[in-house]
Amino acid sequence: MDQTIYVAKNCQRCQASGTITLRFLNRVDETVDCPACKGKGVVPVLEPATECPRCKGSGRGDGSCGVCRYCGGRGWALSEMSIEARV
Ligand SMILES: [Zn+2]
Ligand SMILES: [Zn+2]
């Protein structure tokens, strides 16, 4: 029986802190749960863990807010959530 194995890897979007700071022009900064890892600080990555080829694992790209659109800022390829997002 095939078994899919995930490993928990540090989320690059929030630097594994679980929160990100949103900056607004007219308002004070707001700290929210990281949308990439849902506040966990780590993301499930399919074994063998592979850095996102688009952003080279940095999580930064040309998407909104400078976040890599391919991995959503997680920095890892083929995470569980990115698979869901593609369906
Ligand atoms: Zn995160
Ligand atoms: Zn990426």
Image: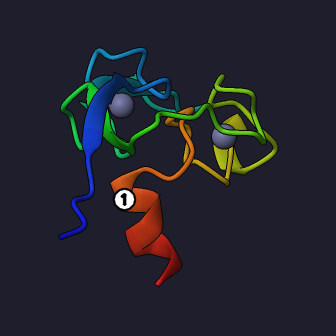
Q: In the image, what residue occupies the spot 27% across and 43% down?
A: 6
Report the coloring of the rendering.
rainbow
Horizontal side of residue 26 vs 31, given as left or right: right
Give residue 62's position: percent from left, percent from top.
82, 44
Give residue 60's position: percent from left, percent from top.
70, 30
Give residue 35's position: percent from left, percent from top.
35, 46
Q: Quadrant of residue 53?
A: top right
User: Is residue 60 visible to us here?
Assistant: yes
Q: In the image, what residue occupies the spot 29% across and 25% down?
A: 19
Q: In which quarter of the image is residue 42?
A: top left
Q: Nearer the viewer, residue 65 or 58?
A: 58
Question: Looking at the picture, does residue 51 appear above or below residue 79?
Answer: above
Q: Which of 33 and 80 is in front in this view?
A: 80
Mark 1: give few (<14), some (14-19) or many (20+) Cα within 10 Å.
Answer: some
Q: In which quarter of the image is residue 58?
A: top right
Q: Which of 28 and 7 is in front in this view?
A: 7
Q: Mark 1 points at which residue?
A: 81
Query: Secondary structure under badge 1?
Result: helix
